[in-house]
Image (spheres, coloured by chain):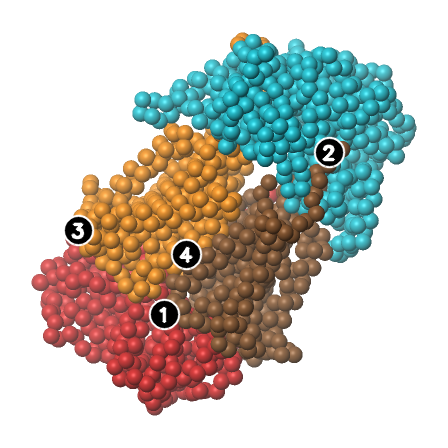
Amino acid sequence: MPRTSGLAAAVTLAALLATAACAKSEDSGDTPAPAGSAGQQVVQSTGATGPTCTLQSFGGQKFDVKKDVVGFSQSEKEANPFRIAETKSIKDEAGKLGIANLRVTNAQSQFSKQISDVQQLIAQGAKLLVIAPLNSDGWEPVLRQAAEKKVPIITIDRKINAQPCTDYLTFIGSDFYEQGKRAADQMIQSLGGQGEVAILLGAPGNNVTTDRTKGFKDRIQEKAPGITISFEQTGEFTREKGQQVTEQLIQSRPGTKGIYAENDEMALGAVTALKGAGKSPGQVKIVSVDGTRAAVQGIVDGWLSAVVESNPRFGPLAFSTAQKFLDGEPIPATVIISDQEYTTANAKESLGNAY
Amino acid sequence: MAEIAVAPRAWGGRAGLLAWLQEYGVYASVLALLLFNVVFTPHFLEVANFRTQLIQVAPVVITSLGMALVIGTEGIDLSVGSVMALASAMVVLYLGYGAPVAIVAALIAGAAIGAGGGALVAYVGVQPIVATLALLVGVRGLANVLVPQLTEFRNPTLITLGSRSVLGLPLVVIIAAALTVLIGFLVKRTTLGRQLVAVGGNRAASRLSGLPVRRVLVTVYLISGLLAAVAGVLATSRLQASDPTSLGLLMELSAITAVVVGGTPLTGGRVRVLGTVMGALLIQLLQATLIKHNLPQSWTQMVQAVIILAAVYAARGRRA
Amino acid sequence: MATAVLEARGISKGFPGVLALDDVSFRLDAGQVHALVGENGAGKSTLIKVLTGVYRPDRGTLLQGGEPVTFDNPLAAQRAGISTIYQEVNLVPQMSLAHNLLLGREPRTRLGVIDMTQLYAEAERVMTRYGIRTDVRRPLRSLGMGTQQMVALARAVSIEARVVIMDEPTSALEPREVDTLFGVIADLRTQGISLIYVSHRLDELYRICDRVTVLRDGRVAHTGPLDKLPRVDLVALMLGRDPAEIRREGATKFSGEHTTAANGPLVEARSLSRRPDLRDVSVQVRPGEVVGLGGLLGAGRSETAKAIAGALPVDGGTVLVAGQEVRRGSPAAAIRAGVSLVPEDRKVEGIVPTLSVRDNIALAALPQLSRSGVVSDARVDRIVDTFMRRLRIKAASPHQKVAELSGGNQQKVLLARSLATGAKVLLLDEPTRGIDVGAKAEVQALIDELAAEGLGVLLISSDLEELVEGADRVVVLRDGAVAGELSGDQVTEQAIMATIAATGETDG
Amino acid sequence: MTTTIAGADTSADARRRPGGLRRERIGHLLQHHGALMVLAVTVVVGAVAFDSFATPQNAANIVVSSSFLAIVAIGMTFVIISGGIDLSVGSSFVLAGVLAAYGSRYGLLVALLLPLAVCGAIGLVQGLIVARTGMAPFIVTLAGLLGMRGLMLAVSGEGANTYLVQNDAFSALGQTSILGLTVPVWITLGLVLLGGVLLQRTSFGQNVYAIGGSEEAAVLMGVPVTRVKVVVYLISGSLAGLAGALNAARLSSGVTILGAGMELDVIAAVVIGGTLLTGGAGGLTGTMAGVLLLGVIQSLINQIGVLTSSFQQVVSGAFLALVVVMQRILHRAQRLS
């Protein structure tokens, strides 16, 4: 009996996978165009005043990126545009540069797993680590192991709270606090400095959430006393939660004039909610952060007012930084990339840059 | 003759109050919460508000109905959230053939996963919590493999499903109500319904009485999977996108809570359909209340914990 | 007069809707074996639970050695030297015999942890005294019921008990084990230990008890020396009936011979085999016939019944109903063919406690009571009503939870469940065990009645008297095989015992 | 008293099952050490297939990162053997980490005792509710899961504040290596030994088994059921707290995004280790094998490398299903043979 049922289960699974083969999804007119060089990251500031780091001061050994093991630890599943673009960028660039031994791990949003993932990369003999950290704090065990073996770590998109050049090599990424401030600027502009604003927070406990919230609030307080932040609830960075919270919001607080969504997904969820409530585009001003194609399209359609970009294409910059480091050049402690903004003015023509 | 005398139910006194709470506690809680909101929440007494709450609770209700049946057999189904995600993935995967085909494909997938879990429980004898835990992990992965990222769609039929109203009532809510009636009928009036509570109440006795215990179990898990898939399709159509990564996350806990708060014991042998719906409504109203009053997440979770404990304490069976 | 070892004065205990004990006084002296009898629901269990600290009485006092005492929980009672052996063996099946025996009193090493060597040695030593030699490290559930009962007794006595309460201790024992038990009881008595002995088996009471207290409806109906009380009067006291009436009716309700139709067998089991329980067991039951299935516990009686009912997979053999072969291993197929089993263990395999009387009765017949999966309430009501009347099931309403009924009525519900399927053959496994005298008589009369209507009945009973009076033919099993078949005048207690006893030589 | 009757020594059961004892032993062995065998096989396969798998450092990594799950799993084993379940451990774990990091500014003692006290107390309360009211442990600890996560968010300013460990002695507790393994690993080993003795060699342990095997019988046998249950949840809460605190010491901060879904990993590990969810049977060696097996599988999936993140989940789910199905089949084979 168990054998037959096991067989049945296997057959079911096989059938399910097989049907996936003959699946036919909706004809999609807007399949993302090949990224090409569009939307490439540009270095904004390199913390020129801060300390720099050389191979010598780091104390590492020169190695060959192309032949030796290079580890990349991704924090979240490649299931949202940002993570997909990020991993793709790293892999593509590695392929382009002929890096043969790139090992990629994914922590599936579990921080403990990311720690052990990176430790395993080190155990596998990785000579260079590129890490997209799930969290800024708590890297002690990894940093110690890496330091023992003098493995340089480049963290991308999120910072690690530790000592650059001793604990890790450098950080390449956006300034989330700054993103929050720029989103506030956009909000102030589209509301004319007046009105009630709601915030759709990201996942609680996440420092992206913390920074984007703080930047936004600080800027509003500083520049637009006429704007009151009357509502902050988490949308957990997902479209569904963003929609649900917005539905509650617009029903119970009809006076809300603007919504600041801490990522594009929640903003798009908010748009669905507004549509469902019979609102017209632009009736409630939405500003968000990320710069995904769907969100930029949202600006074109008039639903979103502005999107502050958070560029995920770290591959070229990460590997060129590593190469520079190996060549003995000084590396700055932080490399802040320049994120652009999508507004009603430039959305249509910049759509190609969105990811 | 030594007959066990059964006293007429006296509704007075402390014991009477407890008995009343056990039977109707969840209704009383929903009512209390409604009253609170009417008094303290602005814009609560609006049609739009009730629409919002009912629309949002519909997928939870539908999933909880299936969960109630499973719990009635002394089982548990942790895979419902992942099945929702899988259904969502199947919908966009097959949308090219038109909405009806896509929906049917999603429902078949949900039923198949449910039946698979049921087979593990019924034929292999794996404990429900473990069998469905494996599915919880694996099926979400599968959904993600099929649809790796959030995918929007424009199929008008599917979008209408999530946003259309019939006679002023949202279609989603009508579907949830219809399924509630259907499951109520199933439990009260059908052979399967009678058999599933018997299986939950005493499996050995059911087997000896010639009940097709294994078939009943597989069917019940299949129904749970099917209902979760329905919920998944509805949630997808409402979102106007398929998002297998986050759709239905932690739905299993909401559904279990709704069922248990509604007065169905985890030990099986009993299914309370209306209680389950009320349980789901209670949680929905609670969350809505906390959101509307802009209380922080930490509050929401702590208050929810207290409500669950209180509701289940009130509803727990009198012990001999 | 010496002070009583244990005395209860004016105990009352009520539950919602029921006054289980009403001003009950009870006295136990040193070295006394005191029978506590009464029908189910008379208050025996409640009294025992009060004496052992499971319940706190609403009124009244307990005295131990003349001093008032209160027990907050079973542990407190145990510490005071009162041990109990319950009807259903209450030990932990997954744990080893040794751990069960010595739970809470495990020998320690100097480090304070359990000394395993000592534990097993001690357990072996104790069990040997009770005539049990087996591997004490085995999980309890792998041992026979008799052994388990002995472990329970050994455990109870070895906690330096001054009072041992036994609730139906022999219900699962073989005669040989009963003898061992009685030997132990005699020993205990000489050591000055007092016993409260609860049983429905009158023979046993008269064999070992000094005094008797009869409870009825929560009150003491009689208390006094047992040897001065004629059996019939004891039964009368328990039932609250006229002793003369009891004498007229005899010990059981069976009327004797049935008119057996001369046509072929209704059900025929051919060479049922299942290693290691059954070897080539063949049984036939003709319409209107009551066939007894005798033998010791573990001889394969229940297994035979379950195999015929499709509830036990078999290695070989066939079951034919009216000449048609029934699909193996499917209770549903057996029920469709008209064969229905009323299992031995009511609580575990019989009733569905969460469901009502009505749903319990209709359970097995659901496929017949529904059309395309939808149950017809009207038909269910009709059939439930019919059988509740016919079997005189006493319940507040069909919607009362079956768990709230007395044992006898639960048994009738199970009979009704079988009959509702339209069964032509009933397999009754110990249908009168553990139910009170009144219900027992009713069930026995019912079996007679059903046979008279042309049903075939396979009756399993440990009660030889019941077997002899009730059955037209008795098939005796021994070690999973048919040891002999007795019919007509051959059906006597002596003949059955002789057939069983023939094993003595082959046993080894 | 010598009432031995000749020949009354063998029970009917024993007579009917010649050789049953040996088979029982083998079955027992399989059920209790099945996970260990699967673990051994998996490790051998991994070592053959991947060069970098069977290295001392990788092994040390697996052991070190598994140690926290292991500590939590010890407590869970107690709970599950007693017939209960504790869903609140993941929340305990993260709450303890935050509290430990917060407490570290007041010294080593506070850093350790604060989380232990809070998580222990919550475990105690859960135990009291379970034991006294008879509410299902699943529900009580589900409420605990929600409530403690809420508490953690409240303590950390809705997750915005990550407290850093400000006590070197406390950090050292999580990071110092002795003989190549960190302190938490040695603590885990100590706890396994201690737990093993507690479970197998003390009355308390036997009482835990008795309650899980048959609560009704345990009551009648005089087991202090309420107390034992309360202690079991207290142990589980405290160990989850300890693991969380040690993890905070290791990470040098009270990370707030940990522990979600940890309860399911822990339950999976305990079940894979052969402890039955119905209670009354199981042990710590199996649990440890289960914990390591999860770690090894994770490591192997990383070694394969080409799997997409979604496929990894499919593989984990399938593997879990496979293990439990295997267990069932072994269990059955043992019964039927």
Determine the colour of chain C: cyan
Q: Residue at x 63, y 39 (%)?
A: C15
Which tag is nearer the camera, tag 4 or tag 1? 4
Marked residue chain, label 1: A
Q: Is residue D327 left or right of residue B104?
A: left
Task: Between residue C110 and residue A111, name the one nearer to us.
Answer: C110
Distance between mark 4 and mark 1 Cα atoms: 21 Å
Q: Residue at x 32, y 85 (%)?
A: A226
**Which amino acid lies under the numbered mark 4 shown in the image of this protein?**
Gly
Residue C245 placement (x, y as % from top left): 85, 23
Distance between mark 4 and mark 3 Cα atoms: 31 Å
Badge 1 is on which residue?
A202
Marked residue chain, label 4: D
Q: Which chain is orange?
A: D
Question: Is circle 2 on the same chain as circle 3?
Answer: no
Q: At numbered mark 2, what does the secondary structure look like: helix, strand or loop? A: loop
Question: CB atoms at circles 4 and 3 under 8 Å apart?
Answer: no
Distance between mark 3 and mark 1 Cα atoms: 33 Å
Give the quadrant of residue C504.
Answer: top right
Determine the colour of chain A: red
Q: At numbered mark 1, what does the secondary structure look like: helix, strand or loop? A: loop
Residue B218 placement (x, y as % from top left): 61, 51
Give the quadrant of residue C392.
Answer: top right
Marked residue chain, label 3: D
Question: CB atoms at circles 4 and 1 under 8 Å apart?
Answer: no
Determine the colour of chain B: brown
Distance between mark 2 and mark 3 Cα atoms: 74 Å
Residue D168, numbered circle = 3
**Which amino acid lies under the numbered mark 3 shown in the image of this protein?**
Asp
Q: Is residue A270 above or below residue C183?
A: below
Residue C503, numbered circle = none
